[in-house]
Image (tube, rainbow, N blue to C red):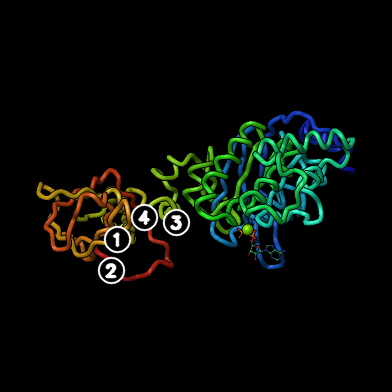
């Protein structure tokens, strides 16, 4: 069965691409339905599910090797899935019976190495994706795209004169000029220095919003994901672990791994007894964990309040590290085997040796089962 004749066009923008005409972007839904991709013994994608709403910006977060790049390659059509389906606007573009080639998917791609062609002017680099358009029209579209990223004045220059940030913006203009309905970006900001990164993120996000492109952006910086994503999708070992707003993931992380991504935490192992954990903060509920199971109690470094005196747990400042706006303290706290790490405002002026009253809100403490591979030391029962 020919996929081209049996499948409706995934998005209007793809029809525009096929004829080389730039049409307005129509936001598209992007769906991964149990997508698998194996390379020999390696399951780069092991049943990945995610639905990205039209116009939504989703940041994809996960450790190195978790399958992020493979997912984008499969979505774009550079790679075929070995199982499951990819859908654009609810019609299959890759699956057991169907394969729509990359150029017909209405998808824009921007990879980490966004190499520009050194022998082409900046304008021609951007117009590269508009080969099907009449020359004048392509030129006009490319100039508009360059204007949008603030580089119109450099249109006739060559890429070597550009800074890293400017090159990134040219690559962005090039990816956006065909007005893709779906934009896939693989660590697009990783090559930029810290000062530039935030400004370019903001700019990029502004442009994605303006073009209403449905966007999937890979990053391995949780903070970046929180700043730019409408939602964050966390993947590990080829699977989606959790997807939600930054607030969801911060307040209700699905597991310890996700909790660690979004805040600095103290992890203390206890044994569960009768559906709860006894610890110096009080009794913490652990209803889903059986008797005798090891559980990790997570206390956020910023979730601990200190006072010079009060009715909290008695403690003593053992160490103070100056980290700019914040100070990171180590506090010996009555009832805890090990010092707790605490982040406070630097201006609070805690000094080593100070006696403190330590307040930890039990409602803000997280409890997870301990993964078998976690270290076995310091269990408190
Ligand atoms: P990420 O982008 O999250 O770092 P990748 O998608 O690049 O992860 O890779 C996921 C897994 O698939 C890794 O174990 C990687 O070694 C493997 N892999 C990716 N591409 C190939 C390939 N072309 N051939 C063999 N193995 C691959
Ligand atoms: Mg990658």
Q: Does label 2 or label 1 sit earlier along the sequence? A: 1
Q: Residue at x 65, y 60 (%)?
A: 44
Q: CA distance from mark 1 to mark 4?
A: 13 Å
Question: In this figure, which residue is indicated by the disc labeled 2?
Answer: 378
Q: For this rendering, which residue is in front, 295 or 154?
A: 154
What quarter of the picture does the C terminus occupy? bottom left
Q: Nearer the viewer, mark 2 or mark 4?
A: 4
Q: Does label 1 or label 3 sit earlier along the sequence? A: 3
Relative height, residue 45 to residue 233 (above, below):
below
C-beta proximity under 8 Å, tags 2 and 1: yes
Q: Quadrant of residue 141?
A: top right
Element at label 1: strand
Q: CA distance from mark 2 to mark 3?
A: 20 Å
Q: CA distance from mark 3 to mark 4?
A: 12 Å
Question: In this figure, which residue is indicated by the disc labeled 3?
Answer: 257
Question: In this figure, which residue is indicated by the disc labeled 1?
Answer: 268
Element at label 3: helix
Residue 211 in the image: x percent, y percent?
67, 32
Which quadrant does ligand 1 occupy?
bottom right
C-beta proximity under 8 Å, tags 3 and 4: no
Q: Does label 2 or label 4 sit earlier along the sequence? A: 4
Relative height, residue 97 to residue 238 (above, below):
above
């Amino acid at each position: 069965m020919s996929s081209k004749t049996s499948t409706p066009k995934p998005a209007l923008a793809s029809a525009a691409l096929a004829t080389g005409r730039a049409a307005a972007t129509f936001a598209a839904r992007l769906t991964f339905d149990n997508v698998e991709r194996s390379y020999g013994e390696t399951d780069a994608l092991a049943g990945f599910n995610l639905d990205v709403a039209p116009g939504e910006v989703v940041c994809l977060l996960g450790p190195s090797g978790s399958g992020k790049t493979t997912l984008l390659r499969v979505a774009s059509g550079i790679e075929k899935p070995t199982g499951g389906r990819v859908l654009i606007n609810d019609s299959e573009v890759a699956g057991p019976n169907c394969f729509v080639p990359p150029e017909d998917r209405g998808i824009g791609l921007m990879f980490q190495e966004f190499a520009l062609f050194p022998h082409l002017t900046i304008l021609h680099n951007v117009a590269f994706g508009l080969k099907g358009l009449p020359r004048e029209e392509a030129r006009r579209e490319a100039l508009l795209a360059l204007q949008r990223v603030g580089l119109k004045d450099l249109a006739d220059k060559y890429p070597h004169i550009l800074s890293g940030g400017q090159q990134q913006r040219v690559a962005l203009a090039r990816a956006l000029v065909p007005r893709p309905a779906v934009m896939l970006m693989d660590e697009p900001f990783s090559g930029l220095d810290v000062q530039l990164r935030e400004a370019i993120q903001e700019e990029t996000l502004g442009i994605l919003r303006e073009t209403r492109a449905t966007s999937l952006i890979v990053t391995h910086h949780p903070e970046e994901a929180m700043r730019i994503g409408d939602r964050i999708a966390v993947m590990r070992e080829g699977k989606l672990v959790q997807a939600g707003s930054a607030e969801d993931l911060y307040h209700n992380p699905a597991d310890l791994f996700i909790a660690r991504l979004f805040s600095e935490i103290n992890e203390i192992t206890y044994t569960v007894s009768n559906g709860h954990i006894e610890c110096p903060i009080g009794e913490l509920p652990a209803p889903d964990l059986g008797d005798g199971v090891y559980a990790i109690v997570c206390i956020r470094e910023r979730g601990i309040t200190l006072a010079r005196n009060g009715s909290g747990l008695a403690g003593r400042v053992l160490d103070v590290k100056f980290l700019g706006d914040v100070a990171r303290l180590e506090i010996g706290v009555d009832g805890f085997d090990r010092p707790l790490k605490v982040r406070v405002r630097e201006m609070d002026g805690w000094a080593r040796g100070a006696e403190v009253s330590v307040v930890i809100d039990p409602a803000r403490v997280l409890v997870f089962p301990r993964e078998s591979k976690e270290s076995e030391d310091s269990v408190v029962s």
